[in-house]
Amino acid sequence: MRLAEIMAELRRYLDDDAPELSLPPAAFTSPELWEAERERVFGRSWLLAAHADDLAGPGASVTLAPAGRPLTVTRAEDGTLRGRSALGPHRPAPTVEEWRGFVFVNPDASAEPLAPHLRRIGEELDAYRLPEMTRIAGWTEEWHCNWKIAVQNAHENYHAMGLHPATVALITPPGGAMEVRAESRWVTRLLSPFREPLAATALPLSDEQRATMYNCAVFPCGSLAAFGDSVVWITMIPLTVDRIEVRGGVLMHPSALDGQDRDALREQNEEGAAVVNREDRLGMEAVQRAVGSRFAERGHLSPKEPGVVAFYRGLARALVTD
């Protein structure tokens, strides 16, 4: 499938009657589409890079390579965060923004601020006290799949029955649906019910909050999920057309850490994340192999996958509109 044909199919997701179909298989393997994404998506989008605890002191830095173009975020002596392109001083410095402890970077030096797009999300997450949360665990992995395969997977819970029968599926209803609300071109809110409300927490959460996982997806490839005393953040940075770097971490509020063994808690959370991540990785890598087959075809989306359509709309806006 040629690039023009893929773009034409993407444009259809912007229609009021958007097709409830998966992307064309070629969208996950096309070198031409990948080159377009490098410029139109990863050259001018907000990327979730780290948590503030990863950049706690002067001189601390984080480097990532979206679409194979390295950039670094550093904590300066005055406490501010500064971005630098690793491609050389002739490149404009990327824009860096810290929002409630989460660090975002945009390769576009003239990018519009992200915070206004997160205003409503911030209000709804007030009870979680995000700015006070502290890092208790983290990970960096490499998966061999196209970034869109991994991101669309994170935009729905339907896959939990197949990929996570002994982990995620134990706390979510079978085929649990998401309530999806598009905030803006950058931000989508996704709510998922738990099988049973969480027990009382150290935070002043309502009954509804204890019964729901609150997920905020920031286009193109970052998200944070709040539930109970914890927040899990994850970002899926594409390195090549079929390889991504998956970074993430677990945060908790200090009030929930009283009397806890921090080392044991870190080990427990990192081991749990490794199990779930492995289940996702194996599934996503299998999908990547399948879409490369000449027999691969588009599939119908379930009514329980509105988050996938929301992601496709964001992708279409980035690629086929100015």
Image (cartoon, rainbow, N blue to C red):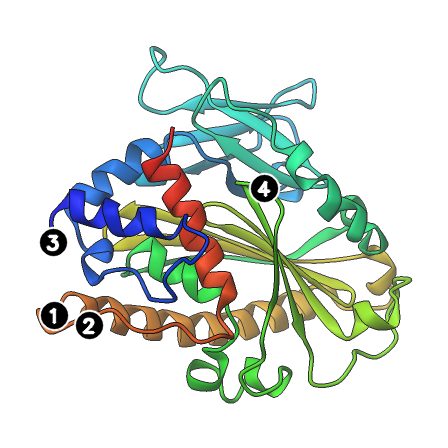
Q: What's the mark number on residue 219? A: none
Q: Amino acid at mark 1?
A: Ser
Would you say the residues marked 1 and 2 are in contact, meaning their CB atoms lie under 8 Å apart?
yes
Q: Amino acid at mark 2?
A: Ala
Answer above or below: position of 78 versus 28.
Answer: above
- Residue 68 seen by the camera: no
> Which residue is label 2 attached to?
290
Answer above or below: position of 86 versus 211.
Answer: above
> Which residue is label 4 attached to?
184
Disc 3 versus disc 1: nearer the observer = 3
> Which residue is label 1 attached to?
293
Quarter containing the C terminus = top left
> Which residue is label 3 attached to?
1
Q: Give the side of residue 177 with respect to residue 259, left or right.
A: left
- Residue 58 seen by the camera: yes
Q: Which residue is pictured at 76% across the width and 68% down the height?
A: 261
Q: Nearer the viewer, residue 65 or 177?
A: 177
Residue 253 percent location from the top left of the image:
80, 57
Disc 4 versus disc 1: nearer the observer = 4
Q: Which residue is pictured at 62% across the width and 85% down the height?
A: 173
